[in-house]
Structures are given as structure tokens and as C-alpha cells.
Amino acid sequence: MWIIRFHKIKPRDYNYVARELKKAGFVPRKITPIIFIKAAIYHKLQKKSWRNTAERLNTRHVYLYNFYKNIQDSDVIYKIFHKFAERRIIVYVGDTKSFTDHDLDNSSDFLQLTNQQLESIL
């Protein structure tokens, strides 16, 4: 099971995402870059549909879908997902039944599980 903790995103993460997408040649005009990454996280990790994701993020699904189709094969998504895993914004807990926020932030077991799961998905 994936735990997504968007409340842990800091301004440096917003800037990092914008820089990485700009390096890849993707400069959105109307939507902030972090929205596209949130959509990719929802779609890839939680298997949410594009319409459901767009409704949740209050945007149009066509923008999100086109972004993902253009960027999915590049290393940008891989780098950003791993950066978010290091910052514990996305955490894979596997079959663990009980854990605390402190465990998610400090346990190296969760980080290893997350990295292994990301390798298999990406």
C-alpha cells in the first residue's frame, strides 16, 4: 500500500519539480508543474483514472494525460519519484498493519521497500 503525504511538500520541492521539468523541455503555462507530478503519482501509484485525478486536482484530464504520455519514458519522472521517496512524501508500507508517522519518517525499512517498489513500477 502506498502512503502519499503531500502535506510534506516544501517550497524547495516545488522548485525542484519546476527545474527538472524545464530541463526536460516541459514548461507549462496555465498549470503549475507540481500538479502534473501529483497527477502522475495518483495515476501510477494509486491506479487512479485521469478523470478522477483531474477532478481531485481541479483541472482538465486532457492536460494531465498529454503531459504523462509525453514525459513517461524520460528519466524525469524516475528522478522526481525517487526524490519524493527520499523526502518521504511517497512511502510504500507493504503489508505492514501498524505504523506511526515517526516510523514513516525515520525507518530505513520503509525507504528500502519504497525504492524496491519504485524500481518494479518504473
Image (tube, rainbow, N blue to C red):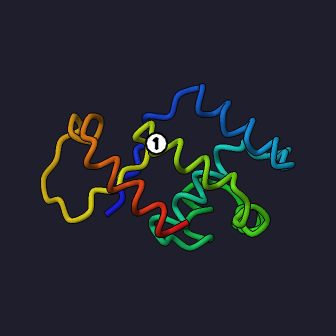
Q: Position of residue 44 (x, y in %)?
A: 53, 66
Q: Is the residue marked by circle 1 packed among few (<14), some (14-19), or many (20+) residues within 10 Å?
A: few
Q: Quadrant of the C terminus?
A: bottom right
Q: Position of residue 66 (x, y in %)?
A: 78, 67
Q: Is residue 22 above or below residue 57?
A: above
Q: Is residue 108 above or below residue 96?
A: above
The residue at 82%/47% (across/down) is 28
- What amino acid is at disc 1? Phe
Q: Secondary structure at mark 1?
A: helix
Compared across the picture, whether 85 is left or right of 104 comes to right
The residue at 64%/55% (across/down) is 77
Name, please, the residue furthest toward the top. Answer: 11
Q: Which residue is mark 1?
A: 6
Q: Quadrant of residue 62?
A: bottom right
The residue at 26%/63% (across/down) is 94
Q: Quadrant of residue 19?
A: top right
Compared across the picture, whether 96 is left or right of 19 comes to left
Q: Position of residue 93 (x, y in %)?
A: 27, 56
The residue at 53%/57% (across/down) is 41
Q: Quadrant of residue 21?
A: top right
Q: Position of residue 78 (x, y in %)?
A: 61, 55
Q: Nearer the viewer, residue 49 or 84?
A: 84
